[in-house]
Image (cartoon, grey):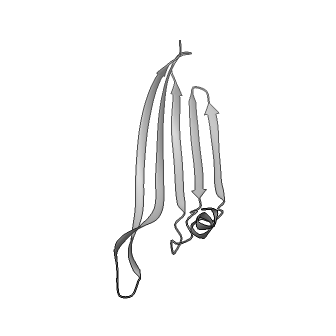
Amino acid sequence: QNDASKDKFQAVSNFRVGAEALAGPVSIRAGYALYGNPLKFVSGTKERQIVSGGLGFRFTESLYLDIAATYQIYQSGSYIYESENSGHSFIMNHDNRYLHVMATIGCRF
């Protein structure tokens, strides 16, 4: 099983960086992440990139609002069919781009 795993997977590097700035009751956040693809058998670059940003507002000592957004960019593939004559698999590639926005209202007590 170890040899089968070594045939399918490879070592990857992941990179993440982020920053936050505070200006009184307002905080501004930004970040970037790059995740490598551990699968050997996938052709092309299948890395996942994530760009993020956010704003935080503190209204009182215990009441706050956070708004965050992430934008993900990555490629994926789907097997359409496998040819019995040639033994080759045919893959359809997808370019994926997703925007996620989330707001949180919090109260500390």
Q: Position of residue 9 (x, y in %)?
A: 59, 65
Q: In the current view of this chain or complex, which residue is farthest to the top?
A: 109
- Residue at 63%, 37% in the rendered image: 21
Q: In the current view of this chain or complex, which residue is farthest to the front?
A: 1
Q: Is residue 73 or residue 42 the one in the foreground?
A: 42
Q: Is residue 79 or residue 60 the one in the foreground?
A: 79
Q: Is residue 100 or residue 8 the one in the foreground?
A: 8
Q: Position of residue 6 (x, y in %)?
A: 63, 66
Q: Position of residue 63 (x, y in %)?
A: 50, 18
Q: Quadrant of the N terminus?
A: bottom right
- Residue at 46%, 52% in the rendered image: 71
Looking at the picture, does residue 107 appear above or below residue 35? above
Looking at the picture, does residue 8 appear above or below residue 88? above
- Residue at 65%, 49% in the rendered image: 17
Q: Is residue 6 or residue 74 the one in the foreground?
A: 6
Q: In the current view of this chain or complex, which residue is farthest to the bottom?
A: 85
Q: Where is residue 100 in the image (x, y as percent from the top left)?
A: 42, 46
Q: How many marks?
A: 0
Looking at the picture, does residue 41 appear above or below residue 18? below
- Residue at 51%, 75% in the rendered image: 43
